[in-house]
Image: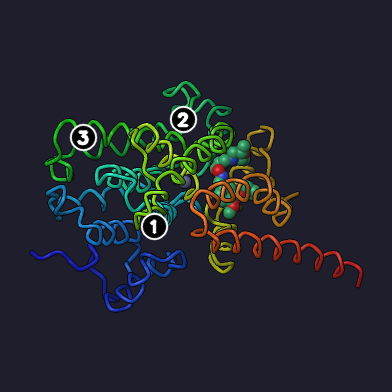
Amino acid sequence: DTIPRFGTETPHEAKLAELMDNIDAWGLNIFDVHNYSQSHSLTSVMYTIFKKRNLIETFRISPQKLINYLVTLESHYLDVPYHCSIHAADVTQAIHVLLLIPSFENTFTDLEILAALFAAAIHDVDHPGVTNQYLINSDNELALMYNDTSVLENHSLAVAFKLLQNEDCDFIENLSDEQRKILRQISIDMVLATDMSKHGAIMQTIQSFHQSLKAKQCKDSNSNSSTNDSLVLTEQKERVQLLREMLHCADLSNPTKHLSIYTQWVDRIMDEFHYQGDRERSAGMPISPMCNRRTADIEMAQIGFIQAIVEPLWQMWAQLVYPHCQQMLDNIDSNRQWYEYQISNRSSRNNT
Ligand SMILES: COc1ccc(/C=N/OC[C@H](O)CN2C[C@@H](C)O[C@@H](C)C2)cc1OC1CCCC1
Ligand SMILES: [Mg+2]
Ligand SMILES: [Zn+2]
């Protein structure tokens, strides 16, 4: 039986086709994709990107096995407000767009691109909608299993690779042993780097790492080749470091999107944090930061998130690929201003 155009059967194929015309754009509305793909945004986004990047031919992937894997992976994302399959689809599409930046035209091998997209798709699978700290504080089985270390990230990796052992889901069966080893190595590295407790370490190294890359890029531009814009990294280690940063950026990209998309993600993360806070409160545990719905200041928390985490990270990234990520910085700025305006409005409302 033939495979549907976007990997999943949907009565809205024409509308989905219209949306998928924007698969290369930062402005793609992933919530519309989810609705018109019958809640298969992760499957349809990944399948469309794989076809567009010719990865199915390059790695002799069985389309049916790819679909089997993606549908199974998608079904292992839980129905939690934020860390659900739409977030995985969102991050996957984001990393696809970041990989399209001209600076990376000649940077990554096909295998590294395959690994990066795979890592994005799997990075939060089976996420229970609570933080690592909550799992540790509540003596959860997962914290016991992973010795309190990057518990959620280790768990998502283990689940994703377990699903791959399923004969009719093994879409990488035609990769050589060496290629499978590299794909596994890069995916593990990238997903473990999405643990927010690693954010500080990434910010420590990003400055000097990017300066060294820019220095090399300048040398290339003397060769007045058309690709003087592109970053050439001879070491796989350096390319993986760049991919690690790229997935972290994609994971923290909500404030870089149009306000109408960003605010939907804010609602979802706050639902998830407040539900965790409810569980902590009823268990007599201390309530985690930003998880208490009774004292929440959502606008202030987002301004803090943007100023402390998202803007500094994206400024480093935008500097490396200048002028290609200006839209992200502009959206961060206008979104922060919008939240500041909400706060100023709120105080004047109280004065009336
Ligand atoms: C759109 O807004 C967001 C989008 C993603 C995220 C992702 N967070 O990472 C997931 C982990 O849970 C990380 N932290 C949990 C927290 C309780 O403690 C931190 C030390 C670790 C957060 C967002 O806003 C948050 C921050 C400010 C208001 C809520
Ligand atoms: Mg995560
Ligand atoms: Zn994530």
* Kind of residue indicated by mark 2: Val
Name the residue beneath numbered marker 1.
102
Most extreme residue toward the bottom is 14
Residues under numbered marks 2 and 3 in contact, where contact means CB atoms less than 8 Å apart: no
> What is the image's colouring?
rainbow
Label 3 neighbour load within 10 Å: few <14, some 14-19, many 20+: some
The residues tagged by marks 2 and 3 sit, at their Cα atoms, a distance apart of 24 Å
Tell me where residue 67 sits by quadrant: bottom left
**Residue 163 at x, y percent in the picture:** 25, 39
Q: Which mark is residue 320?
A: none
Quarter the N terminus occupies: bottom left
Q: Which mark is residue 151?
A: 2
Residues 251 and 293: in front is 251
Does label 1 or label 2 sit earlier along the sequence?
1
* Kind of residue indicated by mark 1: Pro
Identity of the residue drawn at 59% across and 43% down:
276
Quarter the C terminus occupies: bottom right
The residues tagged by marks 1 and 3 sit, at their Cα atoms, a distance apart of 27 Å
